[in-house]
Amino acid sequence: MCSDSKFGTEVLGIDDYSLSLAKKYISSGELVAFPTETVYGLGANATDGAAIKKIFAAKGRPQDNPLIVHLHKDYDVDKLVEVEYDYVYKLREKFLPGPLTMVYKSKGIVSKVATCGLETVGIRIPRSEAAQKFLRAVDMPIAAPSANVSKHTSPVTAAHVFDDLSGKIPLILDGGKCDGGIESTVLDVTHEVPVILRSGLITCEMIKEAVGECEYSDGSDKKVRSPGTKYAHYMPRSETALYRRDDIKGAQEAYDEAVKSGKRAYFMCDEEIGKLLHGNILNLGKTAEEIASNLYYRLLEGEKIADIIIAFDVETGSDIDTGIMNRLEKACKRAD
Ligand code: AMP
Ligand code: MG
Protein backbone atom coordinates (compact mmCIF):
# COMPACT_ATOMS: atom_id res chain seq x y z
CA MET A 1 0.00 0.00 0.00
CA CYS A 2 1.40 3.43 -0.84
CA SER A 3 2.13 5.79 2.04
CA ASP A 4 -0.83 8.14 1.49
CA SER A 5 -3.30 5.22 1.42
CA LYS A 6 -5.65 5.55 4.34
CA PHE A 7 -8.07 2.76 3.49
CA GLY A 8 -8.03 -0.74 2.02
CA THR A 9 -10.87 0.23 -0.32
CA GLU A 10 -13.59 -2.43 -0.56
CA VAL A 11 -15.65 -2.90 -3.74
CA LEU A 12 -18.94 -4.63 -2.93
CA GLY A 13 -22.10 -5.50 -4.86
CA ILE A 14 -25.27 -3.93 -3.52
CA ASP A 15 -26.95 -6.07 -0.86
CA ASP A 16 -28.08 -5.78 2.77
CA TYR A 17 -24.53 -6.16 4.07
CA SER A 18 -22.91 -3.52 1.84
CA LEU A 19 -25.81 -1.11 2.39
CA SER A 20 -25.49 -1.40 6.17
CA LEU A 21 -21.76 -0.83 5.84
CA ALA A 22 -22.45 2.22 3.64
CA LYS A 23 -24.81 3.58 6.29
CA LYS A 24 -22.18 3.03 8.97
CA TYR A 25 -19.50 4.90 6.98
CA ILE A 26 -21.77 7.79 5.96
CA SER A 27 -23.10 8.20 9.53
CA SER A 28 -19.55 8.36 10.87
CA GLY A 29 -18.48 11.06 8.39
CA GLU A 30 -16.69 8.88 5.82
CA LEU A 31 -17.17 8.75 2.03
CA VAL A 32 -18.89 6.08 -0.07
CA ALA A 33 -18.89 5.85 -3.89
CA PHE A 34 -22.16 4.71 -5.48
CA PRO A 35 -23.63 4.22 -8.96
CA THR A 36 -26.34 6.39 -10.52
CA GLU A 37 -27.92 6.36 -13.99
CA THR A 38 -25.38 8.99 -15.15
CA VAL A 39 -21.91 8.35 -13.59
CA TYR A 40 -20.58 7.10 -10.22
CA GLY A 41 -20.88 9.60 -7.36
CA LEU A 42 -18.65 10.16 -4.33
CA GLY A 43 -21.02 10.70 -1.42
CA ALA A 44 -20.93 12.24 2.05
CA ASN A 45 -23.58 13.42 4.53
CA ALA A 46 -24.66 16.80 3.07
CA THR A 47 -25.17 18.32 6.52
CA ASP A 48 -21.69 17.38 7.81
CA GLY A 49 -19.10 19.98 6.77
CA ALA A 50 -16.13 17.92 7.95
CA ALA A 51 -17.27 14.89 5.90
CA ILE A 52 -17.81 17.06 2.81
CA LYS A 53 -14.30 18.50 3.13
CA LYS A 54 -13.04 14.93 2.64
CA ILE A 55 -14.71 14.88 -0.82
CA PHE A 56 -12.81 17.99 -1.90
CA ALA A 57 -9.58 16.50 -0.52
CA ALA A 58 -10.02 13.03 -2.10
CA LYS A 59 -10.77 14.55 -5.53
CA GLY A 60 -8.44 17.55 -5.37
CA ARG A 61 -11.55 19.55 -6.35
CA PRO A 62 -11.38 23.39 -6.46
CA GLN A 63 -12.91 24.92 -3.32
CA ASP A 64 -15.37 27.11 -5.25
CA ASN A 65 -17.09 24.31 -7.19
CA PRO A 66 -20.29 23.37 -5.32
CA LEU A 67 -21.59 19.83 -4.92
CA ILE A 68 -24.98 18.46 -5.91
CA VAL A 69 -27.15 16.96 -3.16
CA HIS A 70 -28.80 13.58 -3.86
CA LEU A 71 -32.08 12.44 -2.30
CA HIS A 72 -34.18 9.28 -2.37
CA LYS A 73 -37.61 9.45 -3.96
CA ASP A 74 -39.57 9.80 -0.72
CA TYR A 75 -37.34 12.41 0.90
CA ASP A 76 -39.18 15.69 1.41
CA VAL A 77 -37.11 17.99 -0.79
CA ASP A 78 -39.00 21.05 0.43
CA LYS A 79 -37.36 20.63 3.85
CA LEU A 80 -34.13 21.72 2.15
CA VAL A 81 -35.17 24.27 -0.47
CA GLU A 82 -37.63 27.01 -1.35
CA VAL A 83 -39.69 26.71 -4.52
CA GLU A 84 -40.02 30.18 -6.04
CA TYR A 85 -41.82 29.38 -9.31
CA ASP A 86 -44.69 26.99 -10.09
CA TYR A 87 -43.02 25.53 -13.20
CA VAL A 88 -40.78 23.60 -10.77
CA TYR A 89 -43.70 21.30 -9.88
CA LYS A 90 -44.27 20.47 -13.55
CA LEU A 91 -40.58 19.71 -14.01
CA ARG A 92 -40.56 17.44 -10.96
CA GLU A 93 -43.60 15.58 -12.22
CA LYS A 94 -42.23 15.16 -15.72
CA PHE A 95 -38.53 14.41 -15.13
CA LEU A 96 -37.99 13.14 -11.58
CA PRO A 97 -36.59 10.81 -10.57
CA GLY A 98 -34.07 11.24 -13.40
CA PRO A 99 -30.88 12.95 -14.65
CA LEU A 100 -32.00 16.51 -13.86
CA THR A 101 -30.45 18.61 -11.07
CA MET A 102 -32.42 21.69 -10.07
CA VAL A 103 -30.65 24.61 -8.37
CA TYR A 104 -32.97 26.17 -5.75
CA LYS A 105 -32.75 28.76 -3.00
CA SER A 106 -31.39 26.83 0.01
CA LYS A 107 -33.04 26.81 3.44
CA GLY A 108 -29.58 26.45 4.97
CA ILE A 109 -29.80 22.82 6.16
CA VAL A 110 -27.32 21.63 3.56
CA SER A 111 -23.81 22.56 4.73
CA LYS A 112 -22.23 25.69 3.22
CA VAL A 113 -19.17 23.51 2.62
CA ALA A 114 -21.22 21.64 -0.02
CA THR A 115 -22.62 24.80 -1.62
CA CYS A 116 -19.27 26.65 -1.37
CA GLY A 117 -20.99 29.45 0.52
CA LEU A 118 -23.73 29.99 -2.10
CA GLU A 119 -27.33 30.74 -1.07
CA THR A 120 -28.49 28.13 -3.59
CA VAL A 121 -28.24 24.34 -3.67
CA GLY A 122 -28.44 21.80 -6.52
CA ILE A 123 -30.77 18.86 -5.78
CA ARG A 124 -30.96 15.62 -7.72
CA ILE A 125 -33.21 12.57 -7.32
CA PRO A 126 -31.57 9.79 -9.34
CA ARG A 127 -33.66 7.24 -11.21
CA SER A 128 -31.22 4.34 -10.85
CA GLU A 129 -32.47 1.57 -8.56
CA ALA A 130 -28.96 1.11 -7.14
CA ALA A 131 -28.67 4.81 -6.23
CA GLN A 132 -32.14 4.73 -4.68
CA LYS A 133 -31.19 1.71 -2.55
CA PHE A 134 -28.10 3.50 -1.24
CA LEU A 135 -29.95 6.79 -0.58
CA ARG A 136 -32.79 4.99 1.14
CA ALA A 137 -30.42 2.95 3.29
CA VAL A 138 -28.57 6.02 4.57
CA ASP A 139 -31.80 8.11 4.62
CA MET A 140 -30.07 11.48 4.62
CA PRO A 141 -29.17 14.06 1.97
CA ILE A 142 -25.96 13.02 0.22
CA ALA A 143 -23.60 15.58 -1.33
CA ALA A 144 -21.87 13.92 -4.27
CA PRO A 145 -19.77 14.98 -7.25
CA SER A 146 -18.51 12.43 -9.77
CA ALA A 147 -16.22 9.84 -8.13
CA ASN A 148 -13.02 10.69 -9.99
CA VAL A 149 -9.90 12.71 -9.32
CA SER A 150 -10.61 16.30 -10.37
CA LYS A 151 -10.11 17.03 -14.11
CA HIS A 152 -10.05 13.32 -14.99
CA THR A 153 -12.78 11.55 -17.00
CA SER A 154 -15.89 10.71 -14.93
CA PRO A 155 -16.20 7.02 -13.92
CA VAL A 156 -18.96 4.79 -15.29
CA THR A 157 -17.88 1.52 -13.61
CA ALA A 158 -16.78 0.61 -10.08
CA ALA A 159 -13.36 -0.32 -11.52
CA HIS A 160 -12.96 3.23 -12.87
CA VAL A 161 -13.67 4.59 -9.38
CA PHE A 162 -11.17 2.15 -7.86
CA ASP A 163 -8.48 3.26 -10.34
CA ASP A 164 -8.84 6.89 -9.19
CA LEU A 165 -9.74 6.65 -5.50
CA SER A 166 -8.33 3.39 -4.18
CA GLY A 167 -6.81 3.98 -0.73
CA LYS A 168 -8.65 7.31 -0.34
CA ILE A 169 -12.13 5.99 0.52
CA PRO A 170 -13.34 2.93 2.44
CA LEU A 171 -16.14 1.66 0.16
CA ILE A 172 -17.30 1.54 -3.47
CA LEU A 173 -20.77 0.11 -4.13
CA ASP A 174 -20.66 -1.75 -7.43
CA GLY A 175 -23.84 -1.50 -9.52
CA GLY A 176 -22.28 -2.31 -12.91
CA LYS A 177 -21.94 0.15 -15.79
CA CYS A 178 -23.94 3.40 -15.65
CA ASP A 179 -25.94 3.59 -18.83
CA GLY A 180 -26.69 7.34 -19.10
CA GLY A 181 -22.99 8.01 -19.40
CA ILE A 182 -22.86 11.82 -18.97
CA GLU A 183 -23.66 13.88 -15.88
CA SER A 184 -27.11 15.30 -15.10
CA THR A 185 -28.49 18.45 -16.68
CA VAL A 186 -28.07 21.30 -14.17
CA LEU A 187 -31.01 23.71 -14.27
CA ASP A 188 -31.27 26.98 -12.33
CA VAL A 189 -34.89 27.34 -11.14
CA THR A 190 -34.40 30.55 -9.16
CA HIS A 191 -35.51 32.76 -12.08
CA GLU A 192 -38.80 33.28 -13.87
CA VAL A 193 -37.43 31.27 -16.80
CA PRO A 194 -35.40 28.10 -16.04
CA VAL A 195 -31.77 28.32 -17.19
CA ILE A 196 -29.58 25.38 -18.17
CA LEU A 197 -26.19 25.72 -16.44
CA ARG A 198 -24.85 22.37 -17.68
CA SER A 199 -26.38 20.40 -20.53
CA GLY A 200 -27.19 16.70 -20.27
CA LEU A 201 -29.73 14.07 -21.24
CA ILE A 202 -32.72 16.21 -20.22
CA THR A 203 -32.44 18.82 -22.96
CA CYS A 204 -33.54 22.42 -23.41
CA GLU A 205 -36.15 21.26 -25.96
CA MET A 206 -37.60 18.75 -23.48
CA ILE A 207 -37.83 21.41 -20.76
CA LYS A 208 -39.45 23.90 -23.18
CA GLU A 209 -41.97 21.27 -24.15
CA ALA A 210 -42.82 20.67 -20.48
CA VAL A 211 -42.98 24.27 -19.21
CA GLY A 212 -42.98 26.53 -22.28
CA GLU A 213 -39.66 28.31 -21.74
CA CYS A 214 -36.02 27.46 -21.09
CA GLU A 215 -32.86 29.48 -21.56
CA TYR A 216 -29.58 27.93 -22.37
CA SER A 217 -26.42 29.10 -20.65
CA ASP A 218 -23.77 26.42 -20.07
CA GLY A 219 -21.35 29.29 -19.37
CA SER A 220 -21.30 29.99 -23.12
CA ASP A 221 -22.50 33.53 -22.43
CA LYS A 222 -19.05 34.03 -20.77
CA LYS A 223 -20.65 34.99 -17.45
CA VAL A 224 -19.87 31.91 -15.39
CA ARG A 225 -23.12 31.00 -13.64
CA SER A 226 -22.25 27.43 -12.68
CA PRO A 227 -18.81 27.53 -11.07
CA GLY A 228 -17.87 24.03 -12.32
CA THR A 229 -18.18 24.86 -16.01
CA LYS A 230 -15.06 27.08 -16.00
CA TYR A 231 -12.63 24.26 -15.10
CA ALA A 232 -10.69 21.79 -17.26
CA HIS A 233 -12.62 18.56 -17.04
CA TYR A 234 -13.16 14.99 -18.19
CA MET A 235 -9.62 14.59 -19.55
CA PRO A 236 -8.22 11.10 -20.20
CA ARG A 237 -4.54 10.49 -19.43
CA SER A 238 -3.60 9.95 -23.09
CA GLU A 239 -2.77 12.73 -25.53
CA THR A 240 -5.89 13.77 -27.47
CA ALA A 241 -6.77 15.60 -30.68
CA LEU A 242 -10.33 16.61 -31.60
CA TYR A 243 -11.16 16.93 -35.31
CA ARG A 244 -14.08 18.41 -37.21
CA ARG A 245 -16.25 15.90 -39.06
CA ASP A 246 -15.27 17.27 -42.46
CA ASP A 247 -11.54 16.84 -41.77
CA ILE A 248 -11.25 13.07 -42.26
CA LYS A 249 -8.08 13.60 -44.33
CA GLY A 250 -6.35 15.67 -41.63
CA ALA A 251 -7.26 13.16 -38.92
CA GLN A 252 -6.10 10.18 -40.98
CA GLU A 253 -2.79 11.95 -41.67
CA ALA A 254 -2.35 12.66 -37.94
CA TYR A 255 -3.10 9.00 -37.19
CA ASP A 256 -0.65 7.71 -39.82
CA GLU A 257 2.02 10.12 -38.59
CA ALA A 258 1.53 8.99 -34.96
CA VAL A 259 1.82 5.32 -35.94
CA LYS A 260 4.96 6.05 -37.97
CA SER A 261 6.57 7.65 -34.95
CA GLY A 262 5.87 4.53 -32.87
CA LYS A 263 2.78 5.76 -30.98
CA ARG A 264 -0.23 3.58 -30.25
CA ALA A 265 -2.98 5.57 -31.98
CA TYR A 266 -6.77 5.13 -31.80
CA PHE A 267 -9.60 7.01 -33.44
CA MET A 268 -12.64 7.66 -31.26
CA CYS A 269 -15.77 8.32 -33.31
CA ASP A 270 -19.33 7.33 -34.17
CA GLU A 271 -20.11 4.53 -36.64
CA GLU A 272 -20.69 6.85 -39.59
CA ILE A 273 -17.22 8.45 -39.37
CA GLY A 274 -15.62 5.11 -38.47
CA LYS A 275 -16.49 3.71 -41.91
CA LEU A 276 -14.29 6.36 -43.56
CA LEU A 277 -11.15 5.71 -41.47
CA HIS A 278 -8.30 3.19 -41.56
CA GLY A 279 -6.92 2.06 -38.21
CA ASN A 280 -7.83 1.21 -34.60
CA ILE A 281 -11.21 2.54 -33.52
CA LEU A 282 -12.88 3.23 -30.18
CA ASN A 283 -16.46 3.05 -31.42
CA LEU A 284 -18.98 5.42 -29.81
CA GLY A 285 -22.01 3.89 -31.57
CA LYS A 286 -24.73 5.52 -33.62
CA THR A 287 -27.48 7.36 -31.74
CA ALA A 288 -26.94 10.32 -29.40
CA GLU A 289 -28.02 8.18 -26.43
CA GLU A 290 -25.52 5.45 -27.34
CA ILE A 291 -22.74 7.97 -27.86
CA ALA A 292 -23.41 9.66 -24.49
CA SER A 293 -23.48 6.26 -22.82
CA ASN A 294 -20.18 5.17 -24.39
CA LEU A 295 -18.20 8.44 -24.22
CA TYR A 296 -16.45 8.20 -20.82
CA TYR A 297 -16.21 4.42 -21.06
CA ARG A 298 -14.28 4.69 -24.34
CA LEU A 299 -12.06 7.54 -23.09
CA LEU A 300 -11.13 5.49 -20.00
CA GLU A 301 -10.60 2.37 -22.09
CA GLY A 302 -8.59 4.47 -24.54
CA GLU A 303 -6.21 5.91 -21.93
CA LYS A 304 -5.09 2.36 -21.08
CA ILE A 305 -4.27 1.31 -24.64
CA ALA A 306 -3.58 4.50 -26.61
CA ASP A 307 -0.77 7.05 -26.58
CA ILE A 308 -3.01 9.32 -28.65
CA ILE A 309 -6.79 9.39 -29.07
CA ILE A 310 -7.90 11.11 -32.28
CA ALA A 311 -11.54 12.09 -31.73
CA PHE A 312 -14.26 13.64 -33.88
CA ASP A 313 -17.07 16.08 -33.23
CA VAL A 314 -20.46 14.41 -32.76
CA GLU A 315 -23.45 15.50 -34.83
CA THR A 316 -26.46 13.20 -34.73
CA GLY A 317 -29.07 15.96 -35.04
CA SER A 318 -30.37 15.27 -31.52
CA ASP A 319 -30.53 18.00 -28.87
CA ILE A 320 -28.36 15.69 -26.73
CA ASP A 321 -25.41 16.54 -29.04
CA THR A 322 -24.97 19.77 -27.03
CA GLY A 323 -24.24 17.84 -23.83
CA ILE A 324 -21.92 15.43 -25.62
CA MET A 325 -19.96 18.21 -27.35
CA ASN A 326 -19.68 20.15 -24.07
CA ARG A 327 -17.83 17.12 -22.61
CA LEU A 328 -15.80 16.32 -25.72
CA GLU A 329 -14.54 19.91 -26.07
CA LYS A 330 -13.25 19.79 -22.49
CA ALA A 331 -11.92 16.23 -22.58
CA CYS A 332 -9.96 16.60 -25.84
CA LYS A 333 -7.60 19.20 -27.22
CA ARG A 334 -8.85 20.78 -30.45
CA ALA A 335 -6.58 19.74 -33.33
CA ASP A 336 -6.63 23.12 -35.09
P1 AMP B 1 -20.13 17.55 -10.57
O1 AMP B 1 -20.20 17.51 -9.09
O2 AMP B 1 -18.76 17.36 -11.11
O3 AMP B 1 -21.19 16.72 -11.24
O4 AMP B 1 -20.51 19.05 -10.93
C1 AMP B 1 -21.66 19.65 -10.41
C2 AMP B 1 -22.03 20.82 -11.28
O5 AMP B 1 -23.18 21.47 -10.73
C3 AMP B 1 -20.92 21.84 -11.36
O6 AMP B 1 -20.87 22.40 -12.66
C4 AMP B 1 -21.36 22.85 -10.32
O7 AMP B 1 -20.81 24.12 -10.53
C5 AMP B 1 -22.89 22.84 -10.50
N1 AMP B 1 -23.58 23.29 -9.29
C6 AMP B 1 -23.76 22.61 -8.15
N2 AMP B 1 -24.40 23.38 -7.23
C7 AMP B 1 -24.64 24.57 -7.82
C8 AMP B 1 -25.24 25.81 -7.39
N3 AMP B 1 -25.72 25.95 -6.17
N4 AMP B 1 -25.27 26.83 -8.27
C9 AMP B 1 -24.77 26.69 -9.53
N5 AMP B 1 -24.16 25.56 -9.99
C10 AMP B 1 -24.11 24.51 -9.15
MG1 MG C 1 -17.38 15.83 -12.15
Image (tube, grey):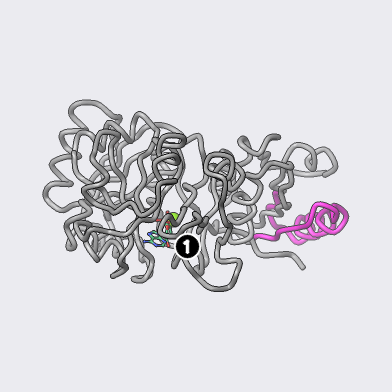
Magenta residues (range): 240-266
Q: Quadrant of the C terminus?
A: bottom right
- Magenta stretch: includes residue 280: no
Q: Residue at x 58, y 55 (%)?
A: 327
The residue that appears at 35% across and 40% down in the rendered structure is: 125
Is residue 32 rendered to the left or right of residue 317? left
Q: Residue furthest right?
A: 249
Q: Position of residue 104 (x, y in %)?
A: 35, 56
Viewer-nearest residue: 102 or 158: 102
As drawn, the residue found furthest toward the top would be: 15
Residue visible at 30% across and 63% down? 115
What residue sits right under mark 1 in the picture?
A: 151
Q: Give the total number of marks visible in the rendering.
A: 1
Q: Is residue 14 above or below residue 77?
A: above
Q: Is residue 335 visible?
A: yes
Q: Disc 1 marks which amino acid? A: Lys
